[in-house]
């Protein structure tokens, strides 16, 4: 039986672990933490062997349904689940309905189901279709089918209420199938909190979902482009006060470092790691500081960060493909495509970083790989960006144990002011 062990709650921040989870009941998930972001069941740009070279690799993996749905019949015929099929059987597997790195296309959900976008275009999923996929995949946790199409600025209150009603209806149907399924005996279903930017609907969604036998909760629709920062913070606080303390809380598409810290303060436990992937796709490297290892390292990070854009990251509209990944660089990254700055810069990407990329290659080399279109550029950047991001979450947990969280927050957010 899954157990949530809270070590401490400091000013709303929850720190602890979840034990006895997973298909074999032998996994431990520490929180606050992140899940390894994957596409088609593997880490972007990285082979399984290369992935193992990363430090602080999360135990939990996020499977993104849009990148896998088209293969579900093959996995079903395989008969051993998505973990073994993808070589991820040693990880804790969580399946999300949408891909947090891609902005969901609006206007395509319907009363009986939702749409996801695979490589071949639109895939319409009703509850029976969705649960058939989960039976084939057999993940440890999976997000219930949900109608999260409320992030557009012109979404009406009526549409928001309908999204909550649909999601609760989907949850009831999914639970009925889940409880009767032999294939899903080792899996747990997570309820989804919808409601757009309406406090009344968020609370209704949370309270009604709490009445169902779910293993945890997914906080959906809190992306940067969906609402103002202060609105998100207030809604998160209100919703999380309603949720029970003994069940995990996962949030999607809130993965910028400053946004992560705000969500941790509200009481969120788990995040996706799509942000390092988006940074990699821009040909950039994460350089934001989150510790005081050395004055030289700190200075290098600050100088690198000063060249980044101060604009809020926005997504492009998804058209059923990989378009829609975030396109504007942030203040947390270094743009290595810049010829004037990096073509002759033979320093490591980040001098204090212990990742394979920084220990063996220079900024000039990464710049060269990007300019010539070499696939190795994304491999090396992905290694560095994951390494840096996972280290950030380790620092968050350590700061909460040591009582230095506010110091960490000041270090991370100093470039955003």
Image (cartoon, grey):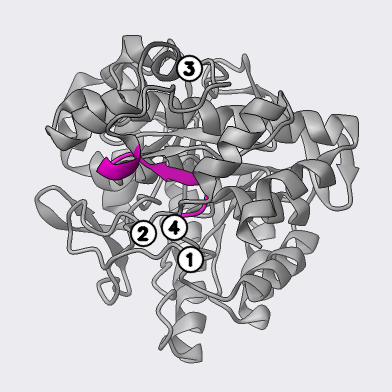
Picture quadrant where residue 145 is located: bottom left
26, above or below 374, in the image = above
> For this view, does 252 lie left or right of residue 397?
left
Q: Which class describes the residues within 10 Å of circle 2: few (<14), some (14-19), or many (20+)? A: some
Measure how far apart labels 2 and 4 are at the Cα level. 40 Å
Segment tinted magenta in the rendering = 330-341
- Determine the residue positioned at 72% across, 72% down: 234
Measure how far apart labels 2 and 3 are at the Cα level. 25 Å
Give the residue number, with chain letter if any, for mark 2: 328
- Disc 1 and disc 2 in contact, CB within 8 angstroms: yes
Measure how far apart labels 1 and 3 are at the Cα level. 28 Å
Give the residue number, with chain letter if any, for mark 4: 173
**Residue 279 in sight:** yes
Dot 1 or dot 4, earlier in sequence: 4
* Residue in front for this viewpoint, 37 or 360: 360
> Within the magenta stretch, is there residue 118?
no
Residue 199, given in percent of the width and then of the height, sits at 67, 79
Element under disc 2: loop
> For this view, does 277 lie left or right of residue 29?
left
**Tag in front: 2 or 4:** 2
Residue 49, given in percent of the width and then of the height, sits at 33, 9
Picture quadrant where residue 383 is located: top left
Give the residue number, with chain letter if any, for mark 3: 355
Viewport quadrant of the N terminus: top right
Dot 1 or dot 3, earlier in sequence: 1
Measure how far apart labels 3 and 4 are at the Cα level. 46 Å
* Residue in front for this viewpoint, 114 or 51: 51
- Determine the residue positioned at 76% across, 69% down: 238
């Amino acid at each position: 039986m899954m157990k949530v062990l809270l070590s401490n709650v400091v000013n709303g921040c929850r720190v602890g672990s979840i034990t006895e989870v997973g298909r074999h009941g032998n996994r431990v998930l520490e929180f606050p933490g992140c899940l390894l972001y994957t596409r088609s069941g593997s880490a972007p740009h990285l082979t399984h062997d290369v992935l193992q070279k990363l430090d602080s690799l999360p135990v939990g993996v996020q499977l993104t349904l849009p990148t896998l749905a088209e293969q579900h019949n093959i996995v079903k015929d395989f008969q051993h689940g998505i973990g073994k099929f993808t070589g991820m059987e040693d990880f804790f597997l969580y399946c999300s309905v949408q891909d947090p790195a891609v902005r969901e296309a609006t206007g395509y959900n319907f009363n009986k189901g939702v749409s996801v976008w695979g490589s071949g275009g639109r895939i319409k999923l009703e509850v029976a279709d969705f649960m058939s996929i989960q039976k084939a995949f057999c993940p440890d946790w999976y997000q219930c089918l949900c109608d999260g199409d409320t992030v557009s600025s012109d979404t009406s209150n009526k549409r928001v209420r309908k999204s909550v009603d649909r999601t609760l209806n989907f949850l009831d149907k999914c639970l009925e199938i889940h409880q009767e399924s032999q294939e899903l005996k080792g899996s747990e279903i997570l309820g989804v909190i919808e409601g757009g930017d309406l406090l009344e609907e968020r609370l209704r969604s949370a309270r009604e979902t709490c009445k169902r036998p779910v293993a945890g909760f997914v906080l959906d629709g809190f992306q940067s482009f969906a609402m103002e920062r202060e609105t998100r913070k207030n809604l998160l606080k209100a919703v999380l006060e309603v949720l029970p303390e003994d069940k995990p809380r996962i949030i999607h598409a809130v993965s910028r470092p400053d946004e992560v810290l705000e969500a941790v303060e509200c009481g969120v436990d788990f995040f996706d790691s799509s942000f390092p992937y988006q940074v990699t796709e821009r040909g950039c490297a994460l350089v934001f500081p989150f510790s005081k290892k050395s004055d030289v390292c700190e200075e290098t990070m600050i100088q690198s960060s000063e060249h980044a854009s101060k604009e809020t990251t926005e997504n492009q509209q998804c058209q059923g493909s990989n378009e829609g990944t975030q396109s504007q660089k942030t203040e947390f990254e270094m743009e290595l495509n810049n010829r004037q700055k990096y073509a002759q810069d033979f320093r490591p990407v980040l001098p204090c970083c212990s990742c394979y990329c920084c220990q063996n290659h220079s900024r000039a080399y990464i710049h060269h790989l990007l300019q010539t279109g070499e696939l190795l550029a994304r491999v090396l950047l992905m290694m560095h960006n994951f390494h840096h991001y996972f280290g950030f979450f380790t620092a968050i947990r350590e700061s909460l144990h040591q009582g230095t969280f506010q110091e960490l927050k000041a270090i991370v957010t100093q470039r955003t002011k």
